[in-house]
């Protein structure tokens, strides 16, 4: 993705606050199994498991504009307290009721296997279940492989019940919309799914006024608004939501805005989960997977970067919650890969993608014993 220029970060946060509405309390219901996959682009495992990193709390290494305010928001005495300050839903709900993979310090590294350590190869591995050396750039080339989204969209009971939303407009190519016929809304595209909700209308009206800091990547608010509206209107059984601000602000060496975007992403996860649990079509039968497409460097100099030559950018993380998930918390002494996500998505809705696509990795070891 493109490196952004320095820019004030209050704009998307302000819009998020204006458009965020309260949700109804959860209520139980029966129905077919559903799955939502959410990715936070380039969000490092170091922040997920350890919270804000003090070595990046400065103007030179982290581009921090207001150090006292940043410390107040995210600095706590222990890694456990810091990570919960950064991502309160992931640690307060998902980790307690589900499982989290990728804590290298607990003997549980999670890695990508494509070797490229950047976005398109990562998303393709994640959604197809295996790396493909032909996917070697971020160019908008239609994915030659069938993703688990496309595969599920062809399965009985899932036809027309699969969709994807993303801030990055390369998502159209990753999912190969021409072949897959999976509905995708990505980048700066306005919402056109009539009738539009009040939130969709508000974002459409603001799109021409928003600064295009990244020509191919919209603010997360645009994507989260569309995804939530689609859930309410169409009630898909399978939904993928790709958020991108964490990667963009990291490339811009703005550690403060990188952390803020991670927290906003976590707030979206809470609102999404609470929305799903308030709807009879989803309550009690829906799983949520949250992960990332690649890691980043771990030094003051290269934390902004990723790619084949960046040591450590192969490490990722994954969190899972749902009715079939054992509540084991942070997994220890278990190694996992990005290629296991595709089969896990399918398994959590009762489908066996791994058998149908032998090149794919098996699902993550998350389900309850029958």
Image (tube, grey):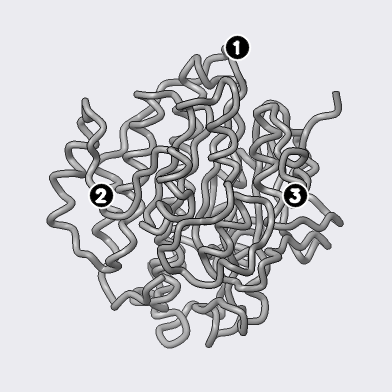
Mark with earlier residue (3, 1)? 1
The residue at 37%/77% (across/down) is 3
Q: Is residue 144 left or right of residue 125?
A: left
Q: Position of residue 164 (x, y in %)?
A: 44, 42
- Secondary structure of residue under mark 3: strand
Quarter of the view holding residue 334: bottom right
Indicate which disc residue 239 carries: none
**On the image, numbered disc 2 is attached to which residue?**
189
- Secondary structure of residue under mark 2: loop
129 and 337: which is toward the camera: 129
182 lies above or below 23: below
**On the image, numbered disc 1 is attached to which residue?**
30
Q: Position of residue 107 (x, y in %)?
A: 83, 62
Residue, far top: 30
The residue at 22%/65% (across/down) is 212
Q: CA distance from mark 3 to mark 1?
A: 29 Å
The residue at 49%/36% (across/down) is 239
Q: CA distance from mark 2 to mark 3?
A: 38 Å
The residue at 46%/57% (across/down) is 142
């Amino acid at each position: 993705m493109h490196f952004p220029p320095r820019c004030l970060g209050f704009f998307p946060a302000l819009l998020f606050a204006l458009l965020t509405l309260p949700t109804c309390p959860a209520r139980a219901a029966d129905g077919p199994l559903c799955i939502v996959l959410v990715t936070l682009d380039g969000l490092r495992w170091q922040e997920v498991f350890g919270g804000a990193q003090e070595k990046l709390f400065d103007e030179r290494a982290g581009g921090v504009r207001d150090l006292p305010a940043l410390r107040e928001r995210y600095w706590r005495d222990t890694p456990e307290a810091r990570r919960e300050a950064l991502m309160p839903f992931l640690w307060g709900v998902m980790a307690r009721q589900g499982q989290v993979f990728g804590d290298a310090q607990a003997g549980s590294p999670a890695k990508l296997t494509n070797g490229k350590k950047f976005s398109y190869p990562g998303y393709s591995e994640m959604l197809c279940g295996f790396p493909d050396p032909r996917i070697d750039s971020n160019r908008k080339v239609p994915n030659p492989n069938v993703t688990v989204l496309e595969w599920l969209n062809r399965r009985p009971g899932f036809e027309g019940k699969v969709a994807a939303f993303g801030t990055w407009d390369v998502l159209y190519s990753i999912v190969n919309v021409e072949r897959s016929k999976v509905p995708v809304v990505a980048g700066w595209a306005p919402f056109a799914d009539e009738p539009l909700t009040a939130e969709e209308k508000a974002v459409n009206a603001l799109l021409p006024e928003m600064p295009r800091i990244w020509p191919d990547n919209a603010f997360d608010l645009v994507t989260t608004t569309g995804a939530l509206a689609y859930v309410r209107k169409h009630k898909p059984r399978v939904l993928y939501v790709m958020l991108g601000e964490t990667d963009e602000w990291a490339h811009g060496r703005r550690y403060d805005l990188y952390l803020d975007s991670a927290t906003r992403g976590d707030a979206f996860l809470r609102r999404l989960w609470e929305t799903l649990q308030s709807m009879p079509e989803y309550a009690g039968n829906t799983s949520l997977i949250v992960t990332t497409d690649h890691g980043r460097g771990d030094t003051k100099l290269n934390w902004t970067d990723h790619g084949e030559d960046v040591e450590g950018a192969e490490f990722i993380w994954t969190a899972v919650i749902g009715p079939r998930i054992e509540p084991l918390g942070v997994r220890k002494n278990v190694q996992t890969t990005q290629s296991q996500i595709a089969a896990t998505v399918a398994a959590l809705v009762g489908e066996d993608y791994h058998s149908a696509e032998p090149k794919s990795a098996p699902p993550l070891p998350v389900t309850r014993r029958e």
